[in-house]
Amino acid sequence: GENVEQHPSTLSVQEGDSAVIKCTYSDSASNYFPWYKQELGKRPQLIIDIRSNVGEKKDQRIAVTLNKTAKHFSLHITETQPEDSAVYFCAAMPLSGTYKYIFGTGTRLKVLA
Amino acid sequence: DGGITQSPKYLFRKEGQNVTLSCEQNLNHDAMYWYRQDPGQGLRLIYYSQIVNDFQKGDIAEGYSVSREKKESFPLTVTSAQKNPTAFYLCASSIRSSSTDTQYFGPGTRLTVL
């Protein structure tokens, strides 16, 4: 069935370093790929998303890259700060048909000061 | 995000009781969703609805029921058949358009079984 694998499950980086989280999806019909950040006890919040007709998208220190051939996409955070510490979820969804999102299992990012 | 509300924020249930979690949105979104999140875990889909008066089971629908009588509302009932309902419940909504497919989450309801 549809599946999104997310790695790593935990990631620790020093403040100022970069962090990369990778997701691989199984449904080739997937065309929309959002990333969510969830702080402890809070709701997931969208931080960046990308559609299949774009290979890369940036927003300040955050970027997402997409490789449709390999069916994987990655979140890149540069110049990490302690407030980047949270759980990050990737997701995949086809642009037509079902409204169902397939979420990855999450990555707990710890930025060490 | 402010357009999706969930109530109550905390809910306590005795074993054998049914409880209903409220979810309302004023974003004019077509689709609504319920997820369950256990401590340190990911998001598991319980039910989703793409249109009024229609809904589909997600991955863990057993012991739960929903209704979608109005576009703005998608209540979730946790029945006594759900063996271990203690969890954080998140409601979400989304709209399909040429410009966005973003799913927005409510603030969540934390359910504890006593």
Image (cartoon, grey):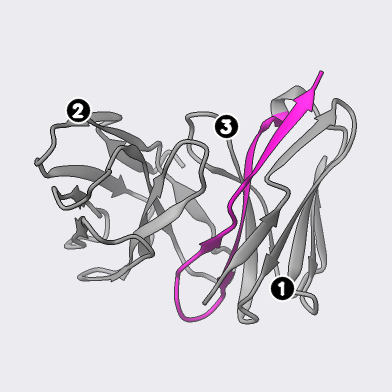
Q: Secondary structure at mark 3?
A: loop
Find disc 1 in the rendering and name its residue: A52
Mark 3 or 1: the one toward you: 3
**Membership of B105 in magenta stretch:** no
Q: Secondary structure at mark 1?
A: loop
Q: Chain of mark 1?
A: A
Q: Quadrant of the C terminus of chain B?
A: top left
Between residues A7 and A21, which one lies in front from this camera angle?
A7
Span colored in magenta: A84-113
Q: Residue at x 70, y 66 (%)?
A: A24
Dot 3 surroundings within 10 Å: few (below 14), some, or many (20 or more)?
some
Q: CA distance from mark 3 to mark 1?
A: 28 Å
Q: Quadrant of residue B113?
A: top left
Q: Residue at x 13, y 37 (%)?
A: B15
Between residues A63 and A3, which one lies in front from this camera angle?
A3
Dot 1 surroundings within 10 Å: few (below 14), some, or many (20 or more)?
some
Find disc 2 in the rendering and name its residue: B114
Task: Say what amino acid the circle numbered 1 marks.
Answer: Ser
Same chain for the residues under marks 2 and 3 in the image: no
Residue A27 horizontal/vertical position (percent)? 61, 78
Q: Is residue A3 left or right of residue B73?
A: right
Q: CA distance from mark 1 to mark 2?
A: 46 Å
State yes or no: discs 3 and 1 in contact (Cβ < 8 Å): no
